[in-house]
Image (tube, rainbow, N blue to C red):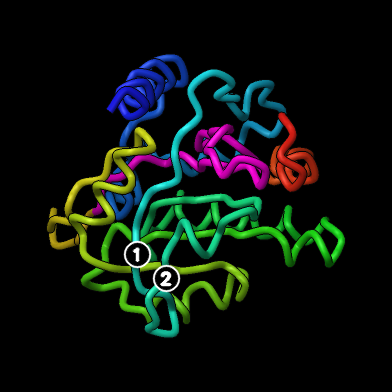
Amino acid sequence: MHSFRNNKLAAAALLAVASLTLTACGGDDDSATSPVSVVSEEPGADKASTVLSENPFEKPDMVLTDTSGKPYDLRKETAGKPTLIYFGYTNCPDVCPLTMNNIAVAKKSLPKAQQDQLRIVFVTTDPERDTPAALGAWLKGIDPQVVGLSGDFATVQAGARTLGITIEAPKKEKGKVVSMHGTQVVAFSPKTDAGYVLYGEDATVDDYTEDLPKLIKGENP
């Protein structure tokens, strides 16, 4: 309980400092607050990541379903592997595909051996529509090596909460299904399996390209 309480406090502080808010993926395209411009127009951001030096996150204890329809024990399958976790959904028109593509492009700059070491995990916040088959088809166009996971929404929501990430059940607004979710990417160390680096939605391809070689080794970016 003490560790979980510390993680909650750390998450609250980080969210306040980084101003990380819920994003309504699937909102109106003409919204003046669309996250697309924020993500794509700040390639020189000085603080793309926050290192959780004192209170790293524990990896969510979740068993979900991968794109082949098989059970995937997140902790077991990614143990000792550098891992990036992101919560989003395939029908998101903006920040979700951009974030995943940024990471996928940066990954290609790594040597083949390091690419194979890295685990990139995409957990859907819209499991009713994001079936294993739908996730697999979507991720194939981004990076076939990305692990796509779906499952019971309550399980996904609880797992995200342990990382200080808030997600809400999808709902229909103006004829569209909208999924509200935090846009953070959490990096887990291969040395400790702890979530020790957090990225906001302003992280760019260049940021991930610079940081991935260090994250692969469990070093601070």
* Percent x, y of residue 160: 33, 45
Please, what is the three-letter code of the amino acid marked with disc 1? Answer: Val
Where is residue 27? Give x, y as percent. Answer: 28, 50
Query: If you read the primary sequence from the N terminus, does the residue marked by circle 2 or circle 1 appear first?
Result: 1
Q: Does the magenta stretch include residue 150?
A: no
Circle 2: element type: strand
Q: In this view, does 2 lie above or below 162?
A: above
Residue 72 - label = 2
Total tally of numbered discs in the picture: 2
- Residue at coordinates 42% horizontally, 75% vertically from top-left? 66
Residue 128: quarter of image: bottom left
The numbered disc on residue 63 is 1
Q: What residue type is labelled 2?
A: Tyr
Quadrant of the drawing holding the C terminus: top right
Tell me where the magenta segment starts and ends, as one range: 179-204
Give percent across and percent down for residue 62: 34, 58
Based on the displayed image, in which of its 4 quarters is residue 196 positioned? top right
Relative vertical location of residue 211 with respect to residue 51 in this rendering, above or below: below
Asked if labels 1 and 2 touch by Cβ distance under 8 angstroms, the answer is yes
Residue drawn at (60%, 37%), measured in percent from left and top? 203
Along the horizontal axis of the image, is 172 left or right of 147?
left
In percent of width and height, residue 38 lies at 51, 34
Question: Which residue is at the front of the view, 66 or 80?
Answer: 80
Position above or below: 142 against 7: below
Classify 10 Å Cα crowding around label 2: few (below 14), some (14-19), many (20 and above).
many
Q: How far apart are marks 2 and 1 (CA)?
A: 5 Å
